[in-house]
Image (cartoon, grey):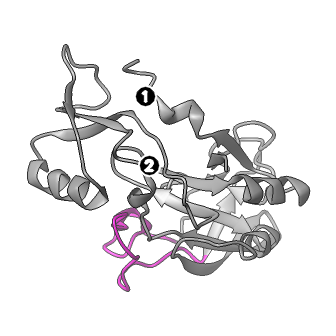
C-alpha cells in the first residue's frame, strides 16, 4: 500500500499560518502548549487552548494550521474531519475539544495529538542514517550508522544526546503496517496516512491539508 505525509495546505487557505496567538492564553507559562514533550503523552500540567483564533484573512478549512504546535505530531481538525478519521485505524492519540473563532463565528474543532510514535514501521535493514553535529548542514563526509530496529535507534539517540544528531539518508517503510495513520519522529518527523485514508479525505472533500507521497521524502534531498 502507498503511504502519504499529512501536511498543511499552503494554497486556498487565505493565510499561513491561519491562526493568530490568543491574548487570553499565556504561551510563556509552565502549562503552555509550547512545552509539550513530543516524545510522549501530553502531561496533565499542560493546558491545551480551549479556543484558537483565525486571522481575518484566513479561510475556514477542515484542517487548520497554527504555529503553536508541531503539525508532524498534532492536527487541529473540524468535526467532519474528526468523524472521517475516526473510521480508520489510528495510532494512539489524545483528543481535546476546542473552539475555532473568526470574528463573531465560532465552530467546534478537535485538537488531536498523536503520542504514539511508530519508528518501528521503518525498515532499518533498508534504511540509511548518519551522525552529524547539525543534520541541516551537509558535512564534508557522511558518517553512516546502522540500527537493528527502533529500540536500537532510540538507545543510540540517548547516548549521543547533546553531542551529535542522527539524520536520515534514505528511509523505507516495512510492508506489514496495520495502521491508517501513524507518526514518525526523531530523524524525520511526520504524520503518515494510508492510501485508503487519503482517498476518504478526498471523497469527503476535506480542506486545508496536503497529502505528499512518502517517496518524495524517502531520499533526503539535502544529501543525495
Packing grade of label 1 (10 A; few <14, some 14-19, many >=20) is some
Which residue is located at x 37 percent, y 67 percent?
36
Residue that label 1 marks: 220
Task: Tell me which residue sits at (70%, 51%) in the image.
Answer: 55
Query: Does the magenta stretch mainly form a helix, a strand or a loop?
Result: loop
| 180 versus 7 height, above or below | below
Find residue 63 and report its horizontal and vertical position in percent. 72, 58
The magenta stretch is: 25-50
Quadrant where the image shows the C terminus: top left
Quick check: 71 left or right of 170? right
In the image, 102: left or right of 158?
right
Residue reaching furthest to the bottom: 44
Residue 187 lies in the magenta-colored region: no
Residue 189 disc label = 2
Q: Secondary structure at mark 1?
A: loop
The answer to which of 219 and 19 lies nearer the viewer is 219
Q: Residue at x 21, y 40 (%)?
A: 165
**Mark 1 vs 2, N-terminal side:** 2
Q: Report x, y in % for residue 156.
A: 16, 52
Frontmost residue, 55 versus 143: 143
Tell me residue 125's x, y (percent).
Answer: 34, 44
**Above or below: residue 116 compared with residue 58:** below
Amino acid at each position: 500500500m502507498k503511504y502519504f505525509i499529512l501536511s498543511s495546505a499552503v494554497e486556498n487557505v487565505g493565510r499561513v499560518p491561519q491562526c493568530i496567538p490568543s491574548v487570553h492564553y499565556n504561551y510563556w507559562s509552565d502549562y503552555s502548549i509550547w512545552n509539550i514533550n513530543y516524545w510522549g503523552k501530553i502531561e496533565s500540567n499542560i493546558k491545551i487552548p480551549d479556543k484558537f483564533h483565525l486571522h481575518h484573512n484566513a479561510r475556514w478549512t477542515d484542517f487548520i494550521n497554527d504555529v503553536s504546535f508541531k503539525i508532524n505530531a498534532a492536527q487541529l481538525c473540524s468535526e467532519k474531519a474528526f468523524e472521517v478519521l475516526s473510521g480508520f485505524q489510528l495510532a494512539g492519540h489524545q483528543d481535546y475539544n476546542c473552539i475555532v473563532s473568526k470574528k463573531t463565528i465560532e465552530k467546534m474543532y478537535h485538537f488531536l495529538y498523536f503520542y504514539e510514535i511508530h519508528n518501528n514501521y521503518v525498515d532499518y535493514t533498508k534504511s540509511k542514517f548518519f551522525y552529524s553535529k547539525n543534520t541541516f548542514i551537509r558535512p564534508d563526509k557522511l558518517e553512516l550508522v546502522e540500527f537493528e530496529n527502533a529500540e536500537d535507534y532510540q538507545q543510540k539517540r540517548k547516548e549521543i544526546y547533546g553531542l551529535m544528531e542522527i539524520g536520515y539518508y534514505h528511509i523505507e517503510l516495512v510492508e506489514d503496517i496495520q495502521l491508517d495513520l501513524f507518526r514518525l519522529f526523531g530523524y524525520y518527523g511526520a504524520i503518515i496516512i494510508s492510501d485508503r485514508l487519503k482517498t476518504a479525505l478526498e471523497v469527503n472533500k476535506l480542506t486545508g491539508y496536503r497529502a505528499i507521497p512518502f517517496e518524495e521524502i524517502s531520499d533526503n534531498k539535502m544529501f543525495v
